Amino acid sequence: MSRTSLRIGAVVAAAAASALSFTPLVQAAPKPSPACDTRVNNTHAKLMECITLEGVREHQKALQSIADANGGTRVSGSPGYDESVDYVVERLKKAGYTPRVQPFTFQTFISLSPPVLERVAPPPAGPVATTFLSYSGSGDVTASVSRPADAGSGNEGCDASDFAGFAAGNIALVQRGTCTFAIKSTNAYNAGASAVIIWNNQAGVINGTLGNDFTLDIPVMAVTQAAGAELAATAGLTMRVKAETFRGQATTYNVFAQTSGSTDNVVMAGAHLDSVNAGPGINDNGSGSAAILEVAEQMAKVRPVNAVRFAWWGAEESGLVGSRYYVTNLSEAERDQIALYLNFDMVGSPNHVFFVYDGDNSDGTGLPGDAPAGPEGSAQIEKTFEAFYAKVGEPFKGTDFSGRSDYGPFIEIGIPSGGLFTGAEGVKSVEEAALWGGTAGQQYDPCYHLACDTYANNNDHALEVNSDAIGFSVLQYAMNTSDVNGRPGKGNFPPVSGDGAGTSGAGGDSGSSQGGLHDHDHAPTHTE
């Protein structure tokens, strides 16, 4: 969820709009039609009339209530997460599914008390705003502060030699840079550091992790760029660092629900259900989890050509543990049965941009080879989302498959993937604010991985548009994956990516896709 690029694509826009040659749908009502309780939502028009913002927000409100009753968190391995699983399972059962819960064990990280970072000397003494790095060890240390060699290079702390002559027992102040937090912290620990403070090299807080394989018993805190620079410039600095954490094996769960349809051409749609330790995670990722739950409920009576397998992943925030466990434990035959994977992680960010995962690497962001194209078929998934945004008059922009969400394990085994994202700790540009509104110079989600990621941390417009986009894409591929893998689908659900024949006498509901989208009054702006 990192680097992005922007380009206006008139040719792509025209092609996308042409591909969606639907009769316009009236704007969806604020509340679903009474018919939604009984009818089969086997067209885009019917389905998107029944997928509502109110329905998605109902699920988010429930997740907030669960967090409120469990110390403000729904982190995997905690009662708050277990109750989130129970909620999803009960809603799925009520909708008519037979959900499956998949247990697995993982190395969990739980904060037992708020982190403490205090300036002791020289004056003025007092607290310094800080956050844990996930999987930090515990400790209560008051000591002098030292910096490693190569300070200011971006590489400081990346080599053991940077800590040559480091005074054992001191606290290491290290700037974020080119190597992992774990490498910097391990080198500091091996040099005798009693704690580590990592300061950001860009605006904003660090909401990072040392990785669930980090087991050293040393507290590791993070501070902002401004706070770190002030500390680094202070001679004779003494600080207090206190961390009280738990790291250990815990059992947590993935949840699955599957529709009818062909089980040798399965369409998967997933979102991680867990939060970070610091907060309730109602945007990250209560938004994606709630949206696919609403879609699953409204698709419960549909008889698609291809089975749809909805997934709610556990322990994503611990390093994609749940999705990786699932993928790793699939047989080769089971892997071959998955046609594609759609990922929805943070789809209602307050200062949003409509990001689409760049299936063909056409945006060319990052370093060469840093975030390559997805497996064959991923480009067509990207085009399907772009076509949706084009038709409803919303600008969109490409974002890399950076490996930071649950599409990662699927891409690694060659399964075509795609999805949506509205931004995390990245900072909105002036150019982006001109297209999507919001505030330039602020994070897409100012509460990313913080306690303030609550029910209020949301953009209704972004969440409503993306909930429709999720429903549209899931139903489209439930009926026809021909553009992705050449597998014939229903002729009245032709591919909207501009690829694939889409002709077949395949089974499934006989609804038409015509009338699937609403045309906004303004002409669409198309970006990638």
Image (tube, rainbow, N blue to C red):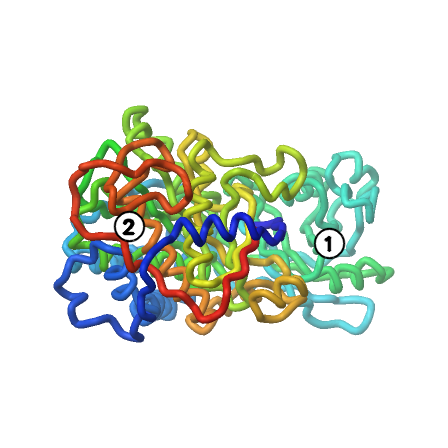
Q: Residue at x 29, y 32 (%)?
A: 487
Residue drawn at the location 46% of the way across and 54% of the way down: 110
Q: Nearer the viewer, residue 131 or 406?
A: 406
| Residues tagged 2 and 1 counted as in contact (Cβ below 8 A) | no
In the rendered image, the residue lying farthest to the top is 332
Residue picked out by circle 1: 201
Residue type of the residue flagged with mark 1: Asn
Left or right of residue 349, residue 333 in this image: left
Which residue, given by chain and number where applicable, does mark 2 sit on?
A: 475
Where residue 97 sits in the image (x, y, percent)? 17, 51
Up-down relation of residue 427 to residue 324 (above or below): below
Classify residue 52 by image quadrant: bottom left
Mark 2 surroundings: few (<14), some (14-19) or many (≥20) residues within 10 A: many
Residue at (46% x, 32% y) in the render = 375
Quarter holding residue 240: bottom right
Q: CA distance from mark 2 to mark 1?
A: 43 Å
- Which amino acid lies under the numbered mark 2 shown in the image of this protein? Leu
Q: Position of residue 173 (x, y in %)?
A: 75, 52
Q: Position of residue 205 (x, y in %)?
A: 64, 61
